[in-house]
Image (cartoon, coloured by chain):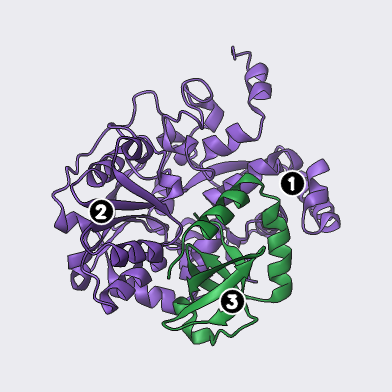
Amino acid sequence: MKYVDEFRDPAAAKDLIASIHKMAEQLGCSWKIMEVCGGHTHTIYRHGLEHLLPEAVEFVHGPGCPVCVIPSGRVDDAVWLSGQPGVIFTTFGDMMRVPGRAGSLLQAQAQGSDVRFIYSPLDAVKVARDNPDRKVVFFAVGFETTAPSTAAALAYAKKIGITNFYVFCNHVLINPPVRAILETKNVTLDGLIGPGHVATVVGSDHFQFVATEFRIPIVVTGFEPLDILQAVAMMLKQFAEGRCEVENQYSRVVRPLGNPEAKRVLEEVFTPKDSFEWRGLGSIPVSGYRLSDEYESFDAEKHFDLPGAVVADHPACQCGLVLTGQIKPWECKVFAKGCTPDNPIGTCMVSPEGACAAYYSFGRIPQILADEGKPE
Amino acid sequence: MCLGIPCEVVALLEGDLATVSVSGVEREVSIGLLVDEGIKVGDWVLVHVGFALSKIDAEEADQTLDQIKKLGQVWDDELDAFKQTEIR
């Protein structure tokens, strides 16, 4: 338990671990719990939580890594955009290394495209303001956590009269892929660890459908190891008492109705798209945002004639199965062989929130490969 | 990208912007998504990609920061990004 001493409250963590073991023993069967958010996946692997919990509690890693769910075709479009005359292409650092068919944005930058990494969509607006002769495109990715920032940046750009700013919108909604996974026959889940920061915006009530329609518990959870342990304990208690409810472990930050202003600006600036193509999940109706008609002039997809091809993933890549919890990262054929964080084939190996990168980075690969008798 | 950074508000600026400070680094962020909260100097907020998304109390912020710093590389990268670019 060397890691536990680093937790916020080591004594509480040890008590929780003991009580989880006791509850699991009394329950006497095994439980598959999906952590929806990549931030949780990162915490679980970084702190070795799966080793602190009873074997009866299995974490299944979910689709909530915004980098991981972007399909190859959209990366190709981003690389294409970055190469258009007069374009300054701005992006979060996380997207720089995602491979497309014609390479990554990092490679496009090395080949002369003006690709700039930024921290905030507001930085992209500033780049546009400072470069009135150029077309500044922002590669918008992320769930409802990040989407309000893009929306507010667009509202600001509109207010100050910026006309050379364009958003390549890949914002996605959390509920549709969760619903798609819960409806998948290959995956049977007993409970969900709900995404804390998405819930900061949408509110914990947003996940009521999980309990009502699918009859499983969901616990909205913070990102520290102690938060996740508490969530698991809350979940086991629900199992023991035969309840399936939405509970909010992260109430120090998350409110039942979320952030009203963030929701308002989302509604003003975005409109749900008819469908969005997800890596691994395919096309899901009403699962992504486009710019609303009022913001049409900022829409990169309207302004530029994007190739927009739907591109199959690399044939060896099994990100789709990882993202839907059907295989573990190390069960992928190319994990740690052809696909590593330095030379990723699939998106799950790119982002620190990707299940594959998280697992690869925290050093249990040799042990796993040895256990399975595979060659290094 | 998805990491929320607890920051202290050190100055209120025009246009829903504020200067915030964390780990000795200052930058401008938007507090426009917290218009209903009446944010003032000395408040702590959780910042995502340049926007304060929720108000938190100082003690909570302190404990969260302690934990986030233990993330190592992920925290270093986020703080670098935070430092690297300026809104104004």
Of the pair A371 and A110, the residue shown nearer to us? A110
The residue identified by callout 2 is A275
- The residue type indicated by label 3 comes to Lys
At mark 2, the secondary structure is strand
- Let me know if residue A205 appears in the view: no
Q: Element type at marker 3?
A: strand
Q: Tell me the chain of label 3.
A: B
Q: Are marks 3 and 1 on the same chain?
A: no
Q: Amino acid at mark 2?
A: Ser
The kind of residue on which mark 1 rests is Ala
Work out whether residue B52 or residue A124 is closer to the camera in this orientation and state it.
A124
Mark 3 → mark 2, Cα distance in angstroms = 34 Å
Q: CA distance from mark 3 to mark 1?
A: 36 Å
Q: Quadrant of the C terminus of chain A?
A: top right
The residue that disc 1 covers is A24
Question: Residue drawn 69% across and 23% down?
Answer: A367
Q: Is residue A168 above or below residue B25?
A: above
